[in-house]
Amino acid sequence: MKNSHHLTTYRLLTVLVTLLLTAQTATAQVGEHRNNLAVGVNAGFIMSNINFLPKVPQSMHTGLTGGITARYTSEKYFNSICAIVAELNYAQVGWKENILTPNDEPVINAITGLREEYQRDMTYLQLPVFARLGWGREQRGLQFYFQVGPQLGYFTGESTKMNFDFAQRTPVYTDGSGRTSSIVAQDTMAVEHKLDYGIAGGLGLEFSHPRLGHFLLEGRYYYGLGNIYGNTKRDYFAISNFANIVVKLTYLFDITRTKNPKIK
């Protein structure tokens, strides 16, 4: 089946998220209570591509992301600080094709004399929701954290950067020269499915100060479980899902904070 690997990945990641959320709920019975709400802003850098099947040779597409963040910290269970994090972000993603000859050299267009380049830029509104576990200082000092959860995205627009006429592109020649890949249908196809969904997870460091707030640096990976194109037997692509690597900075300030002299 075309989506069997998506279903397997989805089930495994759903179990992981459920276990984390269950663990957080359980700590309400035995953990040290917190009632900490912090909000702020985030900004970062995205490296993305799309897993096409049939395969499309690609290099990393680069873009920016930014938005707002809210975090509610509810418990500390032994050494684990438990929280829920939600973001609403604007993200620039897409794919960039790696158009090469069989000798791994750039394809030079016979009409323009330029190296053939193709890039699709796509913008999304993204809503990730994370279960987070942290270890370290809460109010003054460093904390290491891990977070994982589902992410929804809604497609808002796209543009194409192409320095050759599609009808006059270099083909795959019968003598083995020209392009290495004959897969070009994606170059003229608009996004069909506006709703994107998947699982995101990340590791990060947080520096906290009681007056200055919280400064976070995080590395994150997102794996899409949906496709941007149709994937029925009649469609060209069986798979067309996102994979993103994100590096971002976040600043949070406290709205409410538990007053306890034991909290460091």
Image (cartoon, rainbow, N blue to C red):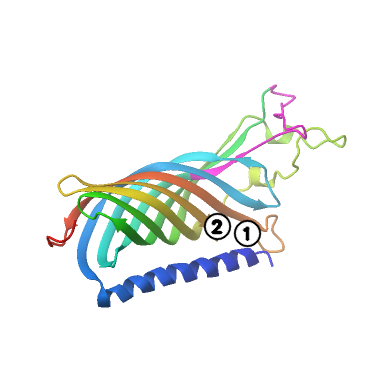
Q: Tag 1, which secondary structure? A: loop
Q: Is residue 99 above or below residue 237?
A: above
**What are the residue bounds of the magenta stretch?**
93-113
Q: Is residue 163 above or below residue 234?
A: above
Give the amino acid at mark 1: Gly
- The quarter of the rendered structure image containing the N terminus is bottom right
Magenta span contains residue 98 = yes
Whether label 1 touches label 2, CB < 8 Å = yes
Which picture quadrant has residue 152? bottom left
209 relative to 184 in the view: left or right: left
N-term mark: 1 or 2: 2
Residue at screen point 39% across, 57% down: 146
In the rendered structure, find residue 193 and report the number of the disc placed on it: 2
Q: Is residue 192 above or below residue 47?
A: below
In the rendered structure, find residue 230 and report the number of the disc placed on it: 1
Q: Tag 2, which secondary structure? A: loop
